[in-house]
Each structure stands twice: as C-alpha cells, then as structure tokens.
Image: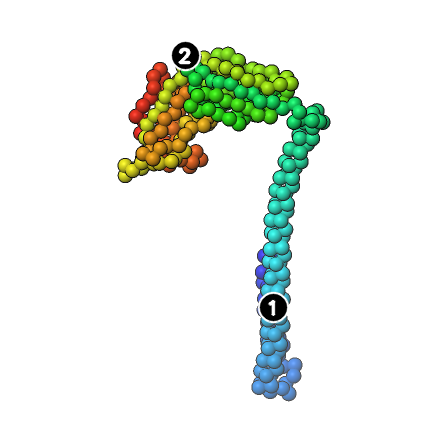
Amino acid sequence: MKWKKRLVLIGGSLCVLLFFVTVAFASNENPQKGIAQRVSDLEVFFADLKSKFTSQQHDIVSLNQKVEGQTTVVAEFKRQLTEQQGLFADLKTQLNELQIKVDQLVQNPNPSANKHRVSGIMVDANGKSFFSGLELVSLSGMHYHLMENGIDNGTFAFYDIPDGTYNIRFYYDSYPIDSLNQIVVAGSDLSGLTIKLAVPTFTVSGQAKHSNGSPMSNQMVTLKAQGNIGGYWPTTKGDGTFVLNGIAPGTYTLQIGDPNVPVATVEVTVSDHDVLSVVAVG
C-alpha cells in the first residue's frame, strides 16, 4: 500500500506543478517569445516530466517486486522452520525411547539371561478351550503381546518376558477373567497356565459377499468391540464363509477386509447361543 500512496502523492505534485507552469507560460514576462516557441518549450518541459514520472513508476514497480521477493523468502523460511520443528520433535521422541532402553539396561545389564517363556491354555466358564487376543501388562505399564497362538485349541505363548509381576488382560475389555489374572515370573519359564473366563463363549459364522452375490474370498475378518479388534481370526474361505470361535456375550461389529477401510460391516449381538448364518455384504 505504501507504493500506491507514493504514486498518488507524485501525481498530485505533478498536477500542482502543471498548473504553475501553465500560468508561467501564459504570462507576459517574455513578450519576445512567439506562441510557437512557447508551445515548443512547453512540450519539451512536459516530455521531461513524463520521463521522470515513468522513471518513478519503474522505481515503484521494482520496489514492489523486491517486497514480493522478500515475502516469498520469508514464507520459505517459515516452511523450513516448520519442517525443522517436525524433525526436532521426531528426534526428541527417538531420544526418549533410547533413554527408556538405557534405563532398562541400567536396571538389568544382562536382559537376555532373565527373559522367559510364558505359556498355557484359555478356557471359558464351561471349561471349553477357546482363543482370543491376550497380553501381559507389567506393573510399570509395559505391554507384552503373544508370540504363539493356537486358534483351534486355545493354547498361547509369550517370549522374552523379564522377571516381574504381570497382569493378564484380554484385548476385549468385556472378557472378564475368573481365575489367574496375575502371574509372577521369577528366574524360570512358566508353562501349563490355565486362564479361565467368567462367562461362556460361542461361535459366530456366516458369509461375506459382494453386492452382486459373488463371494469375498481370502478377506481378513475382524470382530470389533469398543475400539478393539480383540484377537486373531482366520480369513474368509474361497466361498466367502468364515467361522469365529470363542466369542463371549456382547455386541460387536464384524468387519471384512482391511480393518481401517473395511469393504463390508455388519452388527452382531451374542447373548447365550451361537450366532450362525451372518451375512456381510459390501
């Protein structure tokens, strides 16, 4: 806006100057000059003024271009600064993770010598074996996930578990544990554990198919409840059918395909019996 104000100021000054020049040329101070000579002198004078005015315009345009150039430089600097701030945040996260590992090494200089295998079987309230997602949570809040799972027979195994006390937790919050909800690992492996649910489990089965009726084969199947997929499930078969065992009572969303972008979903409620012939259409 400054260059526009400058341009207006220059234009106003030229108008005032033009007025006085016109009066001067129209006066009788130099009666020897003829009209033609006065007109010629006036044309030369105005040509000079026009040249100076054009030069001022060029200067203003050049100044405006420099300002715009500086604005671009500032914008680029801000972009680079934002990028560097993001890199710094990532570095800070990595340093925090490294510090945690260093602290763990300080507490346990030889971790491999004090890590163990924890294994067992899952059964429901009726003593029937089943399988669902399970984890060990240390008293300090560290989470350890399954390394082996027996979907068909309910067996499970954790590896590299340090000495300590751990709470046993199913991924599904609605899966209440009746017994053995805490273990202590102390110098050796733990095997033959039995984790018993306080409720019975049932089977959910059905078929996934496209809107034209063709089956969705070899698609991932997940059962979502309260934001958690809960466990490990086999994919759909060639004809689109699926079978999910070990499902406790509750309301779930059955998803076909990528859990983040499922191709088909259907609500399933399990109460006190198996839920069969579920149809998921996408």
**Which residue is denoted by mark 1 in the rendering?**
58
Q: Position of residue 35 (x, y in %)?
A: 58, 85
In the picture, the quarter occupied by the N terminus is bottom right
The one nearer the camera, 228 or 214, is: 214
Direction from residue 189 to residue 150 in the image, left or right: left
Q: Position of residue 94 (x, y in %)?
A: 64, 36
Q: Could you tell me which secondary element the residue under label 1 belongs to? A: helix
The answer to which of marks 2 and 1 sits earlier in the sequence is: 1
Q: State whether residue 120 appears in this view.
A: yes
Work out how far the residue at label 2 is from the one at label 1, CA to CA, in angstroms. Answer: 92 Å
Residue at 33 percent of width and 30 percent of height: 241
Label 2 sits on what residue type?
Asn
Q: Residues within 10 Å of mark 1 (few under 14, many from 20)?
A: few
Q: Position of residue 146 (x, y in %)?
A: 52, 26
Badge 2 vs badge 1, beta-carbon distance below 8 Å: no
Q: Could you tell me which secondary element the residue under label 2 belongs to? A: loop
Residue at 39 percent of width and 35 percent of height: 219
Residue at 65 percent of width and 83 percent of height: 30
**Which residue is denoted by mark 2 in the rendering?**
126
